[in-house]
Amino acid sequence: MSGAGHKGDLRRALAESADDPDRLALLLADDSITDLDLRHALRGRLPPGVAAFVMERSRFGARQTVLGAVARSPTSAPRLALQALPGLTWRDLADVAVAAELAPAVRQKAEALLLDGLNAMRLGDLITLSRIGPRRVTTRLLYSRDARVRLAGLHNPRLRDGDLCGVLESSDAPREIAAEILQVHRWALSYQVRRAIVRSYVTPHPISLTLIAEMNPGDLRDLAASDDVPPLVSAVARRILG
C-alpha cells in the first residue's frame, strides 16, 4: 500500500480491511510499516478483529511494542489483551492497569504483573512507577527503603487517604513515612491521615505529640482508652482530657 507508513493512513487502511484477512495480510506484509507505526494505529478504536489478526497471524504478533497497543486498545477482546500482558514493559503494564475503559480482568492482571516484577526494576523506573502507577502498586512502594520512591508515591494523584492509613497501621512501614506524609500539603490537611499518624507505632513520638493536641474529643477519648496505640500517646491523651 502506498504511504502505509503514514500513521493516519495505516489506521484507516486497517479499519477498511478488518473483514478481509487476505487484504490485512497483504497490508501488514508491507516492509515500510514499523512497530511504532502499527502501535500508533492500534491505539485507536479499530474493529476487534484487527488486533486479533495482528497478534495471531502477522509478523508483529510477538513484538513488545505492538503487544502494548493490543493490550491497551479498548476494542481488543479481553482474551487477547490478557495474552499480550506477560510480554509488556512495565510502562505499558502501568498504562493498562490505570485505563478505566478496559475490562477489570485485564487491569487487575496488569497490576498483578507489576507487583510481581517490582524487585527486578531499576530505581529510576520504580520512582516513576510510584508516581504514575495504580493505587495498589504505589501503596506497596510506600514501603520502599528509598525515600525517593516513597516521595514519588505520595504525589501520586490516585492514592487515597485510606491507602496511607493502611500503611501507617503496618509494623513494616518505614519510620520516616509519617514525616514524609506531612511534607505533602494534600495529606497534611487530611484529618484522617493525621489521626492515623498519631495512632501508628512507627511514628516518632515528637511527631505524634505535636499532632495529638489537634485530635477531636472523641478521638482523644479513644486514644486514652486504647491498647492499640503507643502507651505514651495514650497517656498524653488522658492528660489532655484531664
Image (spheres, helix red, strand yellow):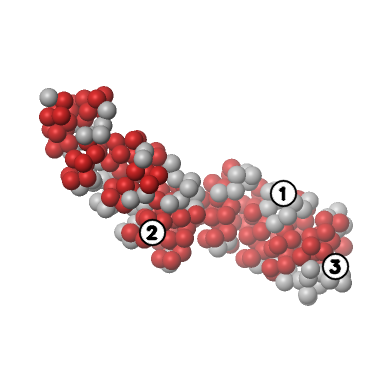
- Which residue is tagged 1? 75
Q: What percent of the width, then of the height, locates residue 129?
A: 47, 58
Report the quarter where the N terminus lies.
Answer: bottom right
Q: Amino acid at mark 2?
A: Val
Q: Amino acid at mark 1?
A: Thr
Q: What percent of the width, then of the height, locates residue 242?
A: 12, 24
- Which residue is tagged 3? 26
**Closest to the observer: 194 or 199?**
194
| C-beta proximity under 8 Å, tags 3 and 1 | no
Residue 239 against residue 202 in the figure, above or below: above
Q: What percent of the width, then of the height, locates residue 164?
A: 36, 43
Q: CA distance from mark 3 to mark 1?
A: 22 Å
> Could one spot residue 43 in this view of the protein?
yes
Helix, strand or loop at label 1? It is: loop
Q: What percent of the width, then of the height, locates residue 217?
A: 24, 25
Helix, strand or loop at label 3? It is: helix
Q: Quadrant of residue 20?
A: bottom right
Q: CA distance from mark 2 to mark 3?
A: 47 Å
Instruction: Say which mark, if any, is on residue 149.
Output: 2
Q: Quadrant of residue 191?
A: top left
For image coordinates 70% across by 62% down, the residue present is: 40
| C-beta proximity under 8 Å, tags 2 and 1 | no
